[in-house]
């Protein structure tokens, strides 16, 4: 597929420094992100039968998502988040120090690819996975209602300010990429991945957030996602998508 040009670069050092300073990637007081973690963890635990052998947690951030397995390798750009694990590697998922076909399965969640180049990241994940292995990938979508009246809406690739992170210094707000689902699916297909299962979340909450910019209050609407994620056109406007993919 044609290589999409990114509209703006993001500051990878700022991302590194931000996550190095915070105590926990998933902050209890941030209801929006704690709901995201709950959905991601539930999806992973429902599909543990596909996560076998040597597992890569790409962009770990120190989160296990309920997986208990001594063969998990935690990879992250921030060392202080993964140093407690026996198997940990400090590196970017865009350039991983592993041999081709090293891992049997991989999880890359917590919107990791939104803070790096999705093309390079998905290519690297494919490279280090064996044939017939499985990947669980989650990302933030440009189709989310919160982007509807912005230049990012429905763009294949666009940078946005991650305004939902409660940061007391607005001048240090992080920039991230958002991607359209069709773009991510095309990237996966180009790297020989087939989507086996999928889910989406933050639909009603995204609609409310677009109108109020109140993260905590908007998160109260996630209960409606159980219905909306099956209804057109609401389901296509989820802020987050998560896929179980098989590499052929």
Image: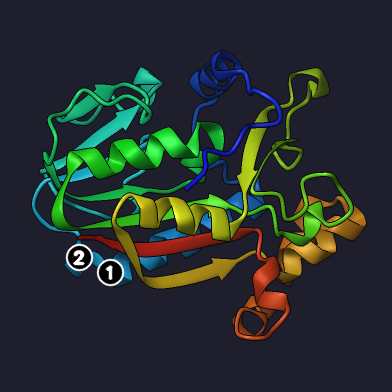
Front one among 107 and 98: 98
Residue density around tag 1, few if under 14, some if 14–19, many if 20 or more, within 10 Å: few
Q: Residue at x 62, y 18 (%)?
A: 11
Q: Position of residue 90 (x, y in %)?
A: 30, 20
Q: Is residue 135 left or right of residue 10?
A: left
Q: Quadrant of the C terminus?
A: bottom left
Q: Which residue is mark 1?
A: 47
Examine the image and state in which quarter residue 174 appears: top right
Front one among 57 and 222: 57
Q: Position of residue 23 (x, y in %)?
A: 50, 27
Q: Are marks 1 and 2 in contact (CB under 8 Å)?
A: yes
Q: Position of residue 15 (x, y in %)?
A: 57, 22
Q: Residue at x 90, y 56 (%)?
A: 212
State whether residue 230 is above or below residue 40: below
State whether residue 59 is above or below residue 84: below
Q: Which residue is mark 2?
A: 50
Marks 1 and 2 sit apart, C-alpha to C-alpha, by 6 Å
Examine the image and state in which quarter residue 50 appears: bottom left
Front one among 92 and 27: 92
């Amino acid at each position: 597929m044609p290589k999409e040009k990114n509209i703006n670069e993001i500051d990878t050092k700022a991302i590194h420094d931000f996550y190095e300073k915070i105590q926990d990637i998933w902050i209890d007081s941030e209801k929006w992100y704690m709901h995201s973690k709950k959905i991601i963890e539930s999806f992973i635990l429902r599909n543990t039968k596909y996560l076998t052998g040597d597992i890569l947690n790409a962009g770990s951030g120190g989160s296990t998502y309920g997986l208990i397995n001594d063969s998990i390798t935690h990879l992250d750009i921030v060392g202080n988040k993964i140093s407690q694990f026996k198997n940990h590697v400090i590196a970017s998922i865009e350039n991983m120090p592993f041999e081709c076909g090293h891992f049997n399965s991989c999880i890359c969640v917590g919107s990791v690819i939104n803070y790096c180049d999705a093309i390079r990241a998905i290519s690297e994940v494919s490279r280090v996975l064996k044939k017939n292995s499985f990947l669980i990938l989650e990302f933030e979508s440009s189709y989310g209602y919160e982007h509807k009246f912005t230049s990012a809406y429905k763009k294949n690739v666009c940078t946005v300010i991650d305004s939902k992170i409660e940061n007391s210094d607005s001048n240090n707000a992080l920039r991230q990429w958002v991607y359209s689902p069709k773009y991510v699916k095309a990237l996966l297909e180009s790297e020989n991945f087939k989507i086996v299962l999928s889910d989406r979340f933050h639909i009603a909450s995204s609609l409310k957030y677009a109108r109020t910019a109140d993260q905590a209050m908007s998160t109260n609407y996630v209960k409606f996602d159980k219905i909306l994620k099956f209804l057109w056109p609401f389901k296509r406007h989820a802020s987050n998508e998560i896929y179980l993919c098989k590499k052929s």
